[in-house]
Amino acid sequence: MKESFRWYGPRDPVTLQDISQTGATKVVSALHDIPNGEVWNKDAIKTHQQIIRNADLEWEVVESVPIHEEIKLRIGSFQKHIDNYKKTLENLASCGIHTICYNFMPVLDWTRTHLFYPMKDGSTGLYYNSSALAAFDLFILKREGAEKKYDTKQIQKAKNYFEVLSSKEIEILTKSIIAGLPGAEEGYTLDQFRKQLKQYEFVSTEDLRENLILFLEEIIPTAEKLKVKMSIHPDDPPFNLFGIPRVVRTSKDLDFLFKRVPSLYNGLTYCTGSLGVRKDNNLKQIFDKFTDRIHFIHLRSIQREGEGNFFEANHLEGDVDMFSIVYAIIKEEQKRKKELFTDWEIPMRPDHGHQMLDDLNKKTNPGYSVIGRLRGLSEIRGLALGISKIINK
């Protein structure tokens, strides 16, 4: 695997020198200062690329080129945004960057209710609590019609959760959900969030899925021509939120997507954490089924706690069988090498990590402190080395 590390740019508390010291040689990054829907021009791409190269690293994967909400809804200036997206792909390809991670999650990107949840060992991690989210939806956001999306038991649990929150805890919960997490690009006030949700009031699962297909039918021919591997990231978490559908949750969703747009440049970011939240997602089967389309990998583990709750576990713990996954990745890379693929190594980054040790006293992006991800990368590197020795024995 091409060992990579995510970097949020010059304002990231984690420096490129820090990344070099992890042993990673590739960087996963984006131009976060450019508003969604606008073209990434060549000069801006080259400048960012050169900053990374000056640290003896290489910008391997773009994560992400965000998809404007008007594209997801097929309203307003959606066609202009699609044309801009194509131009951005052209500019990235001209600079030698050919792997793009993106997602199609409406309104919110990846979502957690707690960003610094205390772990037993004293570190902190990311946590999703379904009662906390329902409490926010019902009693803080007070979304119109929200009570219809929950059963009596869920509403009572949400009420119990809400009633013991202090004003400070309400503020923290609100900020955690809607203020915009690293890489999400968008953040909202309560009023702005309500307005965004309102736009999706009559958008069904079928509508959103079809809008994704229509986007890909326009984008993928350009990607194919440029040899740009588009790699959709599964929804995180992989279920509907705030009454809005999500359409990249399961193996069935992926199957539909790839059958409708069959080009191999319509690919997948294989994220063990996002897919692993659902017990009905068999991670090994998904890897085997869509192997040819896996152009980028996020390795992390989660621990499910029932009723939709989960937290980010250490990379070799939790509900993800990381041994089986890494074994499958290495076998696939060997197969690609035998078939004379020039890019047989798949870029991978350790995704998320606990805030731990010295990072507990630093300001960090939630999930993206350096030491927790370094631990994950080191564990995966050791696991991969052992597996390679066994396979090649």
Image (spheres, rainbow, N blue to C red):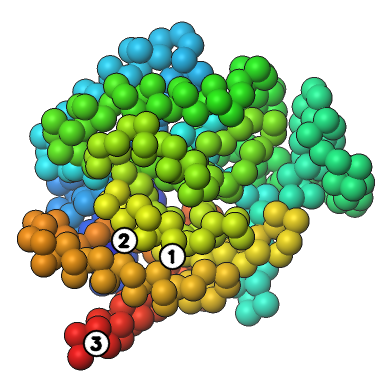
Q: Earlier in the sequence, mark 1 or mark 2?
A: 1
> Nearer the viewer's eye, disc 3 or disc 1?
1
**Which residue is more in the foreground, 391 or 96?**
391
For the residues labelled 3 and 1, the Cα–Cα distance comes to 21 Å
Q: Where is residue 9? Give x, y as percent.
A: 33, 46
In the rendered structure, find residue 389 and report the number of the disc placed on it: 3
Q: Amino acid at mark 3?
A: Lys
> Nearer the viewer's eye, disc 3 or disc 2?
3
Q: How many discs appear? A: 3
For the residues labelled 1 and 2, the Cα–Cα distance comes to 17 Å
**Which residue is more in the foreground, 165 or 147?**
147
Q: Amino acid at mark 1?
A: Lys
Residue 133, picture quadrant: top right
Circle 2 residue: 348
Q: Where is residue 286? Give x, y as percent.
A: 43, 57
Q: Earlier in the sequence, mark 3 or mark 2?
A: 2
Q: SS at mark 1?
A: helix
Circle 1 residue: 284
